Amino acid sequence: MNTLWKYKFWIGGLVCLVAIGLVIGAVRPKRVSGAPAAVPVVEVVSVEQKDVPVYGEWIGTLDGLVNADVRAQVTGYLQQQAYQEGAFVKKGQLLFQIDPRPFQAALDQAEGQLAQAKAMLANAQAVQGRTQLDVDRYTPLVKEQAASQQDLDNSVQNNLAAKAAIETAKAQIQTYDAAVETARINLDFTRLVSPIDGIVGQAQLQVGALVTPSSGVVTSVSTLNPIKVFFTVSEPQYLDWRRRFPTETSRENADRSLRLQLILADGRTYDHEGTFFFADRQIDVGTGAIQIAGLFPNPENILRPGGYGKVRAVIRTQKDALIVPQRAITELQGGYEAAVVDDQNTVSIRTVALGDSVGSDWIVNSGLKAGDKIVAEGVQKVRPGAHVNPKPFSQEAKER
C-alpha cells in the first residue's frame, strides 16, 4: 500500500513538470525568423588610371672596375711587406720586396761581360785598321813588282779576319747587352708594385716565404670608384628593350639615359644612381639570360667586390594604366579576381588579367575599368550578390 502511494506521487510530479514547461513555452516570445542580418562593412578603392613607370628588378653582384693580381715573376724570398692591407695604393707603389742580392749580382756580372765585349770590339777594330794599312801599302808595291803577291794576299786575308773579329765582337756586345737588360728586368721584378690605383687586398704570402712565378697570387688590387655591378636579364626582357630602340643611335641614347638604383643587403637604397656599362656578347645557353654590367659611383669605397644587391631600373612607362592595390586582388586556382561594388552597394566578382607590379599595386590589363570601386579591405566578408556597407580605403589599411 505504501509502495503504491509513492508510485502515484512520482507520476503526479512528472505531470506537473510537463504542464509547467508547456505554460512557459506558450508565454515566451518567439524569435522572428525573417529578421535581416547585419550588412558587412568593407573598405573600397576606385580603380585609378594614369601613366605608370614600370620597374625591373634583378639580383646584382659587385665587382671592381679593374681587378689586378700581383704575382711574383722571379724566384726569391719575400724580404718586406711595404703596404697596409685594405689601404688605398697608387700605381707603382711598392707592395712587396723580394731579396734583390742574387739579381743585383747577376746584373753586375752581365754588365762586366758587356764591358769585356766592348773592349774586344775596340781591339778587333784596332787590328783591322792595321791590316787595312798593310793592304793599302802592298797593293801599289805589287803593281810595281816591289813586293810579292804572297805578301799582298796575306795582308788581305788578315784584314778579312780582322773584319770578322769586329762582327763577332759586335754580336757579343748585343748578346751581353740583352743579358744586362734581362738582369735589370729581373732585378726590377724583385719589387712587387701595384699595377693600378685602388684598394689592395690581404697578403696571401708572408715575409720569409719563397715565391716563384708559379706560386700564385701574392695579393690583389681593385679599382672601386666606380664599381661594377653585374646582373642577369632574361632574353625576352633584353629583346623587348632592344626592339623598342631599333637603331644604333636610339639604343645608345637609351642606354646612356638609363638610370639604375641599387638596393643594398640591409634594405637601404644606395645614395648614388648608376649607369649602363655594357651587355655581354652572348646569352647563356644554360639560363637563357644575358649578363649586364652597370657602373655606380663609389667615392667613399663603401661598396666592395663580392657584395650582393638588388638592381632596379625603369624599363618603360605604361600609358593610361589601370592601377589597383595588390591586396584587392584574390588568386583562385591560377586566376585572379576582384570584388566590385556597384551603385546599389551590391558585390559582383570579376575575373581580371594582371600585368606588372608597381610597388604595392598591380597593373590590370583587363576585367576592370577606370572608376570601378573594388573591395580592398574585407574581401573575405563578401559573396556575389551580397550587399555591403562601403567605406573609403584608409591609409592605415594601406600600411598594414
Image (tube, rainbow, N blue to C red):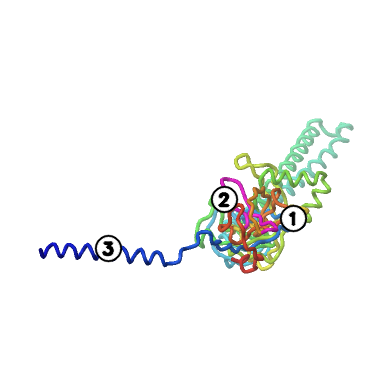
* Quadrant location of the C terminus in the rendered image: bottom right
Report if residue 41 lies within the magenta region.
no
Residue at the (62%, 54%) spot, across then down: 329
Amino acid bearing label 2: Pro
Q: Secondary structure at mark 2?
A: loop
Binning the other alpha carbons within 10 Å of mark 1 as few (below 14), some (14 to 19) or many (20 upward) gives some
Residue 375 horizontal/vertical position (percent)? 63, 59
Which comes sooner in the sequence, label 1 or label 2? 2
Magenta region = 328-344
Q: Which residue is mark 1?
A: 370
Distance CA(mark 1)–CA(mark 3): 72 Å
* Residue 225: quadrant of the picture: bottom right
Residue 192 can be seen, yes or no = no
Q: Which residue is mark 3?
A: 15
Q: Could you say where residue 53 lies in the image, as x and y percent from the top left?
A: 74, 56
Is 36 or 178 nearer to us in this picture?
36
